[in-house]
Structures are given as C-alpha cells and as structure tokens.
Amino acid sequence: MKTVKNGLFLLASVLLCSSTFAQNVGKLEKYLQKGTLKEVETQGFAKKELTRESALTVENVLFEAWKKEIKERYHRSWVSKCFNRDSLRMKFDYRVFGEQPADGRSLFISMHGGGNAPEALNTQQWQNQIRLYQPKEGVYVAPRAPWDDWNMWFKPGLDEFFEALIQTAVVEMGVNPDKVYLLGYSAGGDGTWRMAPRMADRWAAASMMAGHPGEASQVNLRNVPFMIWMGENDGAYDRNKLAVEKGMVMDSLQQAEPQGYIHETHIVKGKGHWMDRADTAAITWMTRYKRNTLPKKIVWRQEEVVRPSMYWLEVERECARYGMSVIAELDGNEVKIEKCDYPRVRVYLNDEMVDMDKPVKVTYQGKTLFEGKVKRTAACLARTLKERGDKELMFSGYVDVEK
C-alpha cells in the first residue's frame, strides 16, 4: 500500500508540475503577443524554475518572438541594403550562391579596401569587393564601411552594425549562425586582424588578406580557425614581414595549446599587394568549419573596443579595460577559472555545457567560489537572447562569482 501511495504521490507531483509549466508557457505566449522580449525577465512567471525539457520549449517560444522583433526592426534595412545607427549608416550589397542546405545558409562578411581616402575611392573598392569572391554556397555580403578613414573597419560602433547584419541575415535569409565567416582585403584585412578576435564568439572562421595587424592580439582566436594571406613582395608598412611574424605567433599559440588555434599562413611567392586571386582558396578552407559556440576553454582578452561578453562568460562593461583577460575551462560540471583580471565574472550555463540537474562547481585557481544547483529560468533565456541576439548563445542559468 505504501508503494502505491508513493507512486500516486509521484504521479500527482508530475501532473501538477506539467500543469504549472503549461500555465507559465501560456502566460509567456500571451505576454509576448503584446509585450517585448526585453521585458520578459521582469515578469513573475519568468522567474519560475524550469526543467531541462521545459527550458527547450521556452527557448523555442522566445526565439520565435525574437525573429518577429528582428523582422520588424530590420526588414526595411535589409530590403534597402542599408543599416542606420544614430548618424551613421552602413550600406551593403549581397549575392546568393547555391541551394540552401538543410542546416541553413552560410554567411560571408567581406570587408573592402581603401581607408583614409576620398569617398569615391572607398566606394569603388566596395563595389569591387562584391565581385571578388564566389563561394559555392551562401549569402556573400560586402558592407560599405560607415567611415572613410584608415581604421574604418574596427572603429567603435562597427560591432553593432555587424550584429545587426548577422541577426537580420539569420531571419531574412535562413542563415545558420554557426556558419558565419569574416574576411577582408587590404584595409578590410586590417579589420579582419582586429574584428576576428574582438567578436570571436560570432565567427565560424576568418581569413585576413593583405592587411596590417597593428597592435592586434591573436589570443582570442583559440576557437576561431584563422587564415593569413599576404603577397611576398607586399612591403608597404612592413605588411609582409608582419604577416610572417603573426603566423609564427599563431604557430606558438597552437604549439602551446594543440586543441585550439587552427590556422594557416600563406605568403604568396612573387606577388605584391594584389595576389592574383590566390587567396580565393580561403573561401573553401573556411567552410570546412562551423562555429564552436560553447567551447570547453575560453581565452578572452579585451581589445580596444571592450565587449561585455564572450561565449559563456560575461563581465561588467564599466569594469572592462583594454588588455584585461580571463581564461576559463569546462571540466564536466566544474568551471575552472585559471586567470581573471576582473573582481567579478558571470558564468552562463545551459544543458549542452553541463548537467544542470546536478551541482555545478566554479573554482578560481583551485579555490571554490561556488558549488550548488543552478536554476533554469525563462528570465535568463530571455535576457541572453535579447543581449546576444543569437539562439545558440542562449543560456538558462548563471552563476556570479567574485575572486
């Protein structure tokens, strides 16, 4: 009799939980009919604990609402081929190649050359760029830099333009966010050196053509396959010498961590700034890779334009400074923070990373900072989708830790 009672009690509990969850999903769907994704996390039902299965359901409901919001916000921009932000605008052109694969289209963001030059010259370089590469499959986009300046492809504000471009391509063109590739020639190569590490969690792979690295660091490229293309005789500003040196840096990084820093360096014999299309081989090479969205190990160094998040880590923007770093690794249900220049860091989690039905441990250089169960909530899913604009970077729970 006791066993029967226990069984009935368990069944009743399951039915009650199912009923409660269904009610909360109903509340979420009803709210999203008139409310916005931005405010979901403030609603009481969004703070209720979710199971693994219910988190997936909520994730899909939120993602559908997000797609609708992106469509409303950017559809006209896609049709007019121009994104506007404050007083700036980023025109673009695109070409579509091949049939759409079952897992979604690829997206290539291809940055043109030019720089601190007359507007007409930069526009002509942009128009050349749209014809420069032809992938077998994908949406090939050539944006026109919002500025006519030497650093036009890595100024503050470019991140937001690229985010809008990627998000809109996902909704308008069926792009798979795990198949987004970055490349650029000359001044566009300058941009690749800097934007590939700066927005590392957005790229499946990247390729730099004939650009100058400046002070760019490559440490953030641990999980981003990266190509270097340079003409042997491209000596202006020591571009050829620096390409060789940076290739050696990538060699050293990969030797120290064989699990990461996939790369190739190509110094094209007898060629100058124009490589006679030898670099077109980069397109096929990049498409061998998909984004490692939830890497086991993150090496994150802030670049000149600081960002609050990278993969499953987040810091307070106001605390972030150029050169600050954090290194963290997933080991089963433990997050090991090896280095952290911040007083506090947030570790986001989901069921693809850890078993959230079991306790999670976060340590810093061997010291335990947190140990316990982490609650899944719709509030966290909504917040991360709103902030990241990427379904693959949605997280159902988080842990805040201090050193």
Image (cartoon, helix red, strand yellow):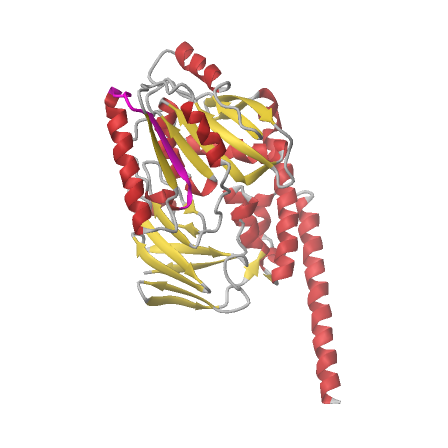
Q: Nearer the viewer, residue 192 or 340?
A: 192
In the displayed structure, does residue 210 sit left or right of residue 179? left
Task: Return the x and y of residue 319 as percentages of the image width and height.
Answer: 33, 47
Residue 357: image quadrant is bottom right
Compared to 195, does 24 lie above or below?
A: below
In the displayed structure, does residue 224 sit left or right of residue 49? left
Q: Residue at x 26, y 30 (%)?
A: 242
Task: Return the x and y of residue 347 as percentages of the image width and height.
Answer: 43, 56
**Residue 249 highlighted magenta (yes or no):** no
Q: In which quadrant is the C terminus drawn? A: bottom left
Q: Which residues are magenta?
A: 223-236
Q: Nearer the viewer, residue 304 or 264?
A: 264
Task: Return the x and y of residue 230 as percentages of the image width and height.
Answer: 33, 26
Task: Return the x and y of residue 214 as percentages of the image width and height.
Answer: 27, 30
Compared to 387, does 362 lie above or below?
A: below
Q: In which quadrant is the N terminus drawn? A: bottom right
Q: Nearer the viewer, residue 231 or 4?
A: 231
